[in-house]
Image (cartoon, helix red, strand yellow):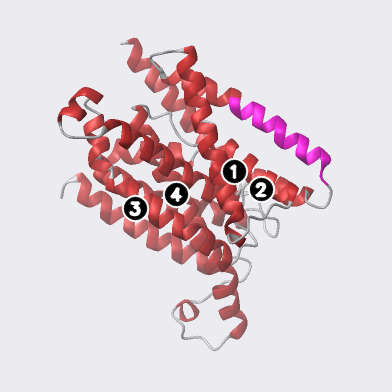
């Protein structure tokens, strides 16, 4: 069996296992009979359907959104260090979300989608700012320049968020929770908020996987192959920003998922984006479900923010990828 079919089988089995573990393990152990609807224990049934199921589904959707956004950014910018967190997009989305909470904003006729919508606007504006400033500093748009610009932008937005925290009152705990990242205390409403964006934006990025493959050969060759390079760039940047904004809106800032998952998927199963993008979605969902499981069980009854777990995992991997890239460049 070749690597790619094996990758699909392993990834799907891991996702199924992650769902089962995420739903069954916790302060109250849930038997298999409850998971399949065969239990008469109403308490266990309530825990499964009203607490754990929405939490696990939300973690899966957030992980899938961040992973496919990161995979798309990496393919477009041709660098494994690109992801919504290192490019500053997550920080921009956080500013949009925190500002919505701070000012109590509500867009007419949008309702509960105000938060993800403004978070997406923050993500998209941030990405455009980063690329504009990076191009002004370096016409060749080297990845080091883009990441440096992303860090500077993130620092500025971090200061804005700190200012809002300093001025806030009752919303303080909610805003801090947003910054740390969590899927705790979420309901099916939050799943409904992010699901349409993951389906539409994520599906569109998957549709553009073949064009991203062509872009790996260079913009000129992609153009000769019939790819509308400018349009694909815009669609990938907008799609990745939409996914990041939607994820941040429901779970807060969760870093490194979009960096680690696509890179490891590409390393293990090849660079064809027709496989990398969907496998990244699947593996991103599994990773965030498992990270959330560890975060809520490692020091029970206290729960750790899921953003802390992904940072502990992602920071060393980021350093490894960075030095690996530098070593390649030196050869």
Residue at label 4? 65
Q: Residue sitting at 28 percent across and 31 percent down?
A: 229
- Extreme front residue here? 108
Asked if one can make out residue 119 in the rendered structure from this viewpoint, the answer is yes
Residue at label 2? 178
Assign a secondary structure to mark 4.
helix
| On screen, residue 285 above or below 21 | above
In the rendered image, the quadrant that contains the C terminus is top left
Label 1 to label 4: alpha-carbon separation: 13 Å
Residue at label 1? 253
From the viewer's perspective, tell me whether residue 309 is left or right of residue 179: left
Label 3 to label 4: alpha-carbon separation: 10 Å
Decide which of tag 3 and tag 4 comes sooner along the chain.
4
Residue contact at pointers 2 and 4, CB within 8 angstroms? no
Assign a secondary structure to mark 3.
helix
Assign a secondary structure to mark 2.
helix
Q: Nearer the viewer, residue 185 or 302?
A: 185
Residue contact at pointers 1 and 4, CB within 8 angstroms? no
In the rendered image, residue 293 lying in the magenta stretch gets the answer no
Residue at label 3? 203
Q: Which residues are the magenta region?
A: 153-168
Label 1 to label 2: alpha-carbon separation: 6 Å
Residue contact at pointers 1 and 2, CB within 8 angstroms? yes
Q: Residue sitting at 37 percent across and 39 percent down?
A: 236
| On screen, residue 32 above or below 152 | below
């Amino acid at each position: 069996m070749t690597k790619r079919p094996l990758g699909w089988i392993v990834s799907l089995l891991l996702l199924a296992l992650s769902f089962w573990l995420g739903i069954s393990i916790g302060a109250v152990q849930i038997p298999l009979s409850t998971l399949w609807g065969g239990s008469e224990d109403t308490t266990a049934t309530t825990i499964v359907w009203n607490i754990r199921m929405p939490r696990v589904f939300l973690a899966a959707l957030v992980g899938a959104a961040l992973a496919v956004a990161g995979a798309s950014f990496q393919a477009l910018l041709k660098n494994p260090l690109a992801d919504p967190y290192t490019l500053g997009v997550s920080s921009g989305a956080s500013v949009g979300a925190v500002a919505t909470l701070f000012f109590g904003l509500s867009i007419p006729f949008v309702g509960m989608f105000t938060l993800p919508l403004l978070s997406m606007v923050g993500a998209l504006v941030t990405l455009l700012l980063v690329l504009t400033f990076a191009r002004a500093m370096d016409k060749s748009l080297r990845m080091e320049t883009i990441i440096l610009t992303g860090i500077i932008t993130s620092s500025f937005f971090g200061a804005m968020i700190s200012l809002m925290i300093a001025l806030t009152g009752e919303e303080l705990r909610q805003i801090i929770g947003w910054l740390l990242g969590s899927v705790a205390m979420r309901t099916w409403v939050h799943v409904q908020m992010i699901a349409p964006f993951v389906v539409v934006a994520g599906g569109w990025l998957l549709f553009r996987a073949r064009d991203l493959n062509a872009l790996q050969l260079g913009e000129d060759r992609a153009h000769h192959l019939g790819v509308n390079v400018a349009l694909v760039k815009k669609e990938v940047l907008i799609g990745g920003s939409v996914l990041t904004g939607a994820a941040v809106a429901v779970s807060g800032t969760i870093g490194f998922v979009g960096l680690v998952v696509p890179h490891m998927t590409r390393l293990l199963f090849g660079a064809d984006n027709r496989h990398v993008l969907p496998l990244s979605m699947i593996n991103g969902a599994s990773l965030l479900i498992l990270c959330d499981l560890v975060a809520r069980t490692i020091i029970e009854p206290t729960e750790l923010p899921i953003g802390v777990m992904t940072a502990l995992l992602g920071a060393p991997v980021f350093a490894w990828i960075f030095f690996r890239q530098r070593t390649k460049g030196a050869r």
